[in-house]
Amino acid sequence: MATLHWEKAWGSLATARTAEGAWTYKRSGFWQQRVGARPAGSEREVATFIPEWTGNGALTVEGGRAYRRAGKGFWGMEKVWQEREDAPPLVGFKHTGALKTEARVILSPAAAVLPEIAQLDDLYRPVAPEEMAPPSTPLADLSLLVTLGFYLMVLEMMDAAIVVTGT
């Protein structure tokens, strides 16, 4: 189970909490944006996401681990984290609502058997084992990928709302 809380109604600072840890996320920059992840209560960045104009991008985690965020499908409405561009997805996110903010987390079948995940049937959509990567990702990174993935989706929806309303 995880929570994502925005510190202010307008702004990009948010706090994510999971059983594995808590992080703060904040977007910075204008022309060259980035999102930094810090352990809650710390000023030390442990991960940095550098987006491309498409919403895809690269995440570098302390210790040298790297992940790629990529869009799937015609409109790229499904986003996945991969260890590299040609690797199978580790975790994915899919917009499921047209008129409301809603998304689904897609986990590998190996992660789905964890007791914490098995009870989240309405949030979890199983996928074929050949479509997902084996669970070699450290559990702390998986929590980071899930919460950062949702954070990025919310930022994208907020940005789209600003463009549509012109404010």
Image (cartoon, grey):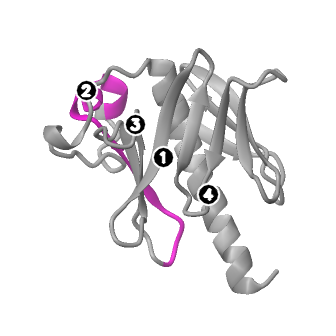
Local SS, label 2: loop
- Compare marks 3 and 2 and give the one earlier in the sequence: 3
Can you tell which of label 3 and label 1 is closer to the viewer?
3
Q: Which residue is mark 3?
A: 84
Residue at (35%, 40%) from the top-left corner? Answer: 120
Can you tell which of label 3 and label 4 is closer to the viewer?
3
What amino acid is found at the position of numbered circle 1 in the picture? Arg
- Compare marks 3 and 4 and give the one earlier in the sequence: 3
Q: CA distance from mark 3 to mark 4?
A: 24 Å
Q: Which residue is mark 4?
A: 154
Front in this rendered view, residue 3 or 70 = 70
What amino acid is found at the position of numbered circle 3 in the picture? Arg
Can you tell which of label 3 and label 2 is closer to the viewer?
3
Q: Which residue is mark 2?
A: 134
- Compare marks 1 and 2 and give the one earlier in the sequence: 1
Q: Position of residue 104 (x, y in %)?
A: 40, 53
Side of 110 where 41 appears, left or right = right
- In reply to whether residue 45 is colored magenta, the answer given is no
Q: Which mark is residue 69?
A: 1
Q: CA distance from mark 1 to mark 2?
A: 17 Å
Residue at (22%, 34%) from the top-left corner? Answer: 109
